[in-house]
Image: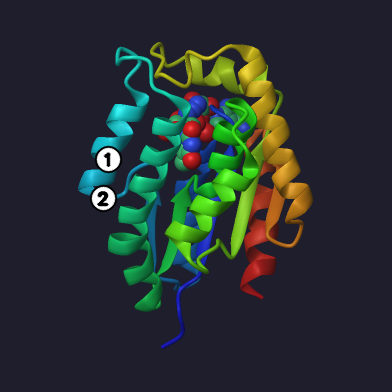
Amino acid sequence: MSRGRFITLEGGEGVGKTTNLAFIKDYLHQHGIPVIVTREPGGTGLAEKIRHLLLDKDSEAVSEHAELLLIFAARAQHIKHVIEPALARGIWVLCDRFTDATYAYQGGGRSMRNSTIEWLENLVQGNLRPDLTVLLDAPVEIGIERARARGFFDRFEAENISFFEHVRRAYLLQAELNPERIKIIKANQPLVDVQREIINIIGAFLR
Ligand code: Z5A
């Protein structure tokens, strides 16, 4: 049995990750590919509890190091109990955010050193890296507007616009550094056009 493939979906808030995750899952199913959908931070009982701590906007001020370590603690659980077992059984894993988000939010947004993130990435992930990443990119105002239409903010969504500009820039830099793996789609176009591009990218990946 061949190992499953690991696909991640990335982008700033409100760019359409959750919407398009379901679309990609259906597309893979139509091609007879067994796939699980999961998310970060989260994906296991403990990792979901860490997610709750991370997103709670009423918590005490969270230090940058605490935030980074909590994210990688959740990731370690997720990899050990969900991602690796699925890939080993030949099941594909479709994940809403992964370590590119850490480079974007903690690296770009919080100005943490990329070398620190990279050290933790190597420690926690070993050789595990996504095989393909779809980066949905849109001007930050658009994503914020879409996300805020929901009417509640979590601890990250309460950040100011310059934080999200830094996040976006860091995502685009990740794509520049990893052009084979990370494919950018403009997310500020009609959903039908976003999904046409997704099919092109996933279709090419399947071939
Ligand atoms: N975080 C971190 O700091 N470091 C890390 O390493 C990781 C995460 C892994 C939780 O993420 C937070 O964790 C995140 C970063 C941090 N915080 N923020 N911000 P999350 O993924 O749960 O949170 P999110 O990015 O805020 O998700 P979201 O707001 O749910 O956005 P989305 O999933 O990308 O969007 P959506 O729900 O699919 O779409 C939003 C709305 O737009 C919805 O009404 C759609 O119908 C609509 N939509 C989608 N596409 C379109 C198009 N093309 N046109 C028009 N309308 C559209």
* Residue 118 image position (x, y, % from top left): 58, 51
Residue 182 placed where, x, y %? 68, 54
The number of numbered badges drawn on the structure is: 2
Is disc 2 placed on a helix, strand or loop?
loop
Q: Amino acid at mark 2?
A: Thr
Is residue 18 visible from the viewing direction of this image? no
Q: Give the label on residue 44, or none.
A: 2
Q: Quadrant of residue 47?
A: top left
Which residue is located at x 55 percent, y 33 percent?
106
Q: Residues within 10 Å of mark 2 (few under 14, many from 20)?
A: many
Q: Position of residue 199 (x, y in %)?
A: 64, 57
Residue in front for this viewpoint, 73 or 129: 73
- Asked whether the viewer can see residue 33, the reply is yes
- Mark 1–mark 2 contact, CB under 8 Å? yes
Q: Residue lying farthest left?
A: 45
Label ID, residue 48: 1
Location of the N terminus (image quadrant): bottom left
Amino acid type shown at disc 1: Glu
Q: Quadrant of residue 69?
A: top left
Asked whether, in this view, residue 56 is left or right of residue 143, the answer is: left
Label 1: how many residues lie within 10 Å, few (<14), some (14-19) or many (20+)? some
